Image (cartoon, helix red, strand yellow):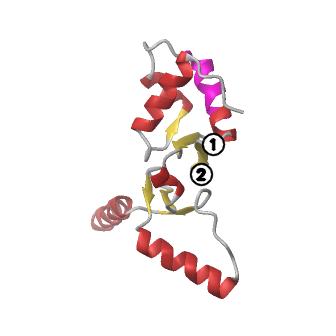
Amino acid sequence: MAAYQTKQRRILLAFLADHPDESLSAADIARALDGRSVSVSAVYRNLAALEEEGKVRRITRSGSRETLYQYTDTEDCRSHLHLLCKSCGSTYHMNQEDAAALIEMLSRREQFAVDTTETVLYGTCEACQIRERMKKNHEKNNT
């Protein structure tokens, strides 16, 4: 059954579609939509419904209680594995060839079928790795 399309829901969906690779909190989304006739309660209510419909993915960053949401209702998202940085919260699509090789290997060696619509690999992105190395070098040089 199709969800009822209120003006607030259409505005929220348009915003999420414009930010498909971002992991955003409900508060971030509400702030971004402030002044566009979308109430905070409508953001929370619609995010819950969109999650049930499989159009957004709820993410909890490691070491944090903050809940983030990522729009996944695009063909690009449904067909890719996702990489989520535990440091900055950025989400990336895994290179399609590498993902296919990983999925094939898991299928062959582990007899395991990966659901790409639900798969998120957690780790640390290159930018955060560099920042962490620079921080460690700075601390090492100042001791």
**Highlighted magenta segment, given as a residue range:** 39-48
Q: Amino acid at mark 2?
A: Gly
Q: Residue at (65%, 87%) from the top-left corner?
A: 109
In the image, residue 78 lies at what x, y percent?
53, 55
Q: Residue at (65%, 23%) from the top-left corner?
A: 4
Calculate the distance from the C-alpha at mark 2 to the C-alpha at mark 1: 7 Å
Q: Is residue 76 visible?
A: yes
Q: Along the line of sight, which residue is nearer the eye, 5 or 33?
A: 5
The residue carrying mark 2 is: 63
Judge whether 18 appears above or below 6 on screen.
below
Judge whether 58 appears above or below 111 on screen.
above
Q: Residue at (52%, 63%) from the top-left corner?
A: 81
In the image, residue 28 lies at what x, y percent?
48, 30
In the image, residue 27 lies at what x, y percent?
53, 28
Q: Along the line of sight, which residue is nearer the eye, 90 or 43?
A: 43
Judge whether 4 appears above or below 130 on screen.
above
- Magenta segment includes 62: no
**SS for callout 2:** loop
Numbered label attached to residue 65: 1
Judge whether 68 appears above or below 46 on screen.
below
Q: Amino acid at mark 1?
A: Arg
Q: Residue at (69%, 77%) from the top-left corner?
A: 112
In terms of image quadrants, where is residue 98?
A: bottom left
